[in-house]
Image (tube, rainbow, N blue to C red):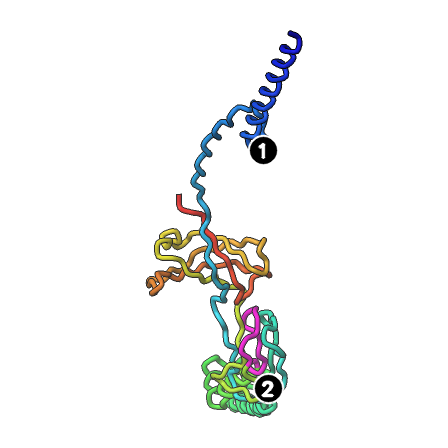
């Protein structure tokens, strides 16, 4: 009897062990047999619609390029410009021309004026006025004496020559960077032929293209933000100043914005222009 009970107990133990082993093999590795099925995750919320700025690539340009001319034809005896890209200040002497011939003319003109003045005095003295009392002559008589002596003409000629002397010293008309040097020291300056040009850095603009469907955002007077490759962390405000009336074959329109002068802004820089979206 005891052996029968022992036999039955052993058989049941083996049966239960085999059943548990089969159930365990049916589960994925590392997952407990009594784990509850994972609940489906909640649906992820849809991304909120974000409004980003639109960015356009452009170039910083000078609004004007000023040629520096000589008013007279003479040899250059001092040329203060050495290299393209050199910075000059408004009023800085950039060249001097040989004024030897002009100074000779001025000397002759002064001698002519002295002669005319002597004749003027002689006319008044011939009318009975003493040398030290010529101012007592009436104005109409003095005027006639100046005309007859050639005094007025000689004085005007000397004044004109002395005025021309200023043309022989050439100064920078604006502050900026030198561009297109076309003459050298001891070269021949000629009226109408620029010695060089100056890029006016006090009047800068940024030029860029925008898609036709974005053109409505860029109205005259709108403020945009400009950054550069060289100084990407700096942001400079600019004001829309011009819009192209023509759309090109690629569906683009040119836009220009005026920049305030800044030491880190130079013509030729690559710029990135952003504008807040229209709400």
* Residue 247 visible in the current orientation: yes
Residue 93 versus residue 228: which sits nearer the camera? 228
Outermost residue to the top: 1
Q: Quadrant of the N terminus?
A: top right
**Residue beneath disc 2:** 76
Is residue 168 a member of the stretch shown in magenta?
A: yes
> Is 152 drawn above or below residue 37 in the view shown?
below
Q: Quadrant of the C terminus?
A: top left
Q: Position of residue 131 (x, y in %)?
A: 59, 86
Give the number of the mark in front: 1 or 2: 1
Q: What kind of element bears circle 1?
A: loop
**Residue beneath disc 1:** 29
Residue 14 versus residue 155: which sits nearer the camera? 14
The total of numbered circles placed on residues is 2
Q: Position of residue 58 (x, y in %)?
A: 47, 62
Q: What kind of element bears circle 2?
A: strand
Q: Quadrant of residue 27?
A: top right
Q: Quadrant of residue 86?
A: bottom right
Q: Position of residue 151 (x, y in %)?
A: 51, 87
Is residue 175 a member of the stretch shown in magenta?
A: yes
Disc 1 packing (10 Å; few <14; some 14–19; many ≥20): few
Q: Earlier in the sequence, mark 1 or mark 2?
A: 1
Residue 43 versus residue 251: which sits nearer the camera? 43
Q: Residue placed at 56% from the left, 23% from the top? A: 19
* Residue 135 visible in the current orientation: no
What's the magenta region?
Answer: 166-181
> Is 66 drawn above or below residue 49 in the view shown?
below
């Amino acid at each position: 009897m005891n052996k029968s009970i022992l036999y039955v107990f052993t058989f049941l133990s083996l049966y239960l062990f085999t059943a548990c082993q089969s159930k365990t093999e049916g589960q994925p590795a590392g997952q407990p047999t009594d784990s509850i099925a994972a609940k489906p995750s909640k649906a992820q919320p849809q991304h909120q619609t974000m409004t980003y700025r639109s960015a356009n690539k452009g170039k910083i340009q000078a609004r004007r390029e000023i040629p520096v001319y000589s008013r007279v034809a003479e040899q250059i005896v001092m040329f203060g410009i050495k290299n393209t890209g050199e910075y000059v200040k408004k009023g800085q002497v950039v060249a001097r021309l040989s004024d030897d011939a002009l100074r000779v003319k001025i000397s002759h003109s002064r001698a002519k004026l002295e002669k005319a003045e002597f004749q003027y005095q002689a006319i008044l003295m011939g009318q009975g006025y003493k040398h030290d009392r010529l101012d007592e002559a009436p104005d109409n008589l003095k005027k006639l004496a100046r005309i007859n002596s050639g005094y007025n003409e000689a004085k005007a000629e000397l004044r004109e020559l002395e005025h021309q002397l200023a043309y022989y010293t050439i100064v920078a008309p604006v502050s900026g960077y030198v561009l297109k040097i076309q003459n050298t020291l001891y070269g021949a300056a000629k009226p109408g032929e620029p010695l060089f040009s100056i890029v006016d850095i006090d009047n800068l603009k940024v030029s860029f293209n925008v898609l036709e469907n974005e053109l409505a955002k860029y109205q005259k007077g709108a403020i945009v933000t400009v950054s550069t490759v060289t100084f990407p962390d700096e942001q400079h405000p600019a004001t829309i100043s011009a819009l192209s009336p023509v759309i090109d074959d690629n569906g683009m329109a040119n836009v220009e914005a005026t920049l305030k002068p800044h030491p880190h802004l130079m013509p030729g820089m690559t710029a990135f222009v952003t504008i807040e979206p229209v709400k």
